[in-house]
Image (tube, rainbow, N blue to C red):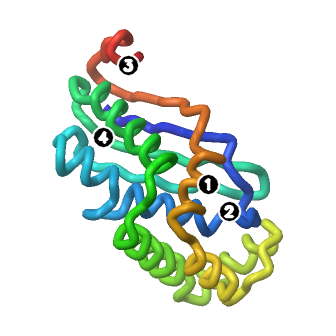
Amino acid sequence: AVVQLGFGPGLKRNSASYPAMRVLSNVLSDFPGGWLEQALRGEEGLAYAVGASVQTGMVPGYFTVLFNSSPDATPEALRCVMNRIDRVKNEPIADHDLQRAQAKTLTSEFLRRQTNSQRATNMALETLYGVRDPEGEAFIQRVKNVDAKSLNDVANRYLHNPVAVIISETPIDDAALE
């Protein structure tokens, strides 16, 4: 089964919370240390692959969690994801998780700015989105300023109203999904 959970409405790309949401997505989903990887793949063996990301643009987007699991494991995997979402809202994030997620956020951001084509695309989109940071210096500083409390705050602000889409060859018991 393929499962995608969407939380929203989210934020716009020019939101001051965008860097913290990017870091939060890497706390939850950064192979092999992300909370969702550890829970779904490591501890429980409930999923084959898992990822979390922030979808933004000119209008508020959403936060998404996507994973693949067997149809039998899907209800338990969904419960596990929601437990991790509750945890990121309510528990302090350990320094090592925060530092790992900050490094991943900065690395992935600037790997996407390597070629002239990537730089031109980023510049065009950031102009469209109202982001005035062509070299990413403000983004770097905002990511470095993210702390555990700000991650709890953005999780509580944006990770609500979950909607799940499940694609499966085998029917999944609706009662198990409640």
Q: Which residue is drawn at the image coordinates 56% and 61% (left, top)?
A: 149
Q: Quadrant of the N terminus?
A: top left
Find residue 41 and report its horizontal and vertical position in percent: 21, 48
Q: Residues within 10 Å of mark 2 (few under 14, many from 20)?
A: many
> According to the image, label 4 marks what residue?
68
The secondary structure type at the circle numbered 1 is: helix
Q: Amino acid at mark 1?
A: Val
The secondary structure type at the circle numbered 4 is: strand
Q: Nearer the viewer, mark 3 or mark 4?
A: 3
First along the sequence among labels 1 and 4:
4
> According to the image, label 3 marks what residue?
177
Q: Residues within 10 Å of mark 4 (few under 14, many from 20)?
A: many
First along the sequence among labels 2 and 4:
2
C-alpha gap between disc 3 and disc 2: 32 Å
C-alpha gap between disc 1 and disc 3: 27 Å
Find residue 69 and report its horizontal and vertical position in percent: 26, 36
Question: Up-down: is 34 above or below 110?
Answer: above
Q: Which residue is drawn at the image coordinates 71% and 63% (left, top)?
A: 13
> According to the image, label 1 marks what residue?
154
Q: Residues within 10 Å of mark 1 (few under 14, many from 20)?
A: some
The circle drawn on residue 17 is 2
The secondary structure type at the circle numbered 2 is: loop
Find residue 52 and report its horizontal and vertical position in percent: 45, 53
The secondary structure type at the circle numbered 3 is: helix
First along the sequence among labels 3 and 2:
2
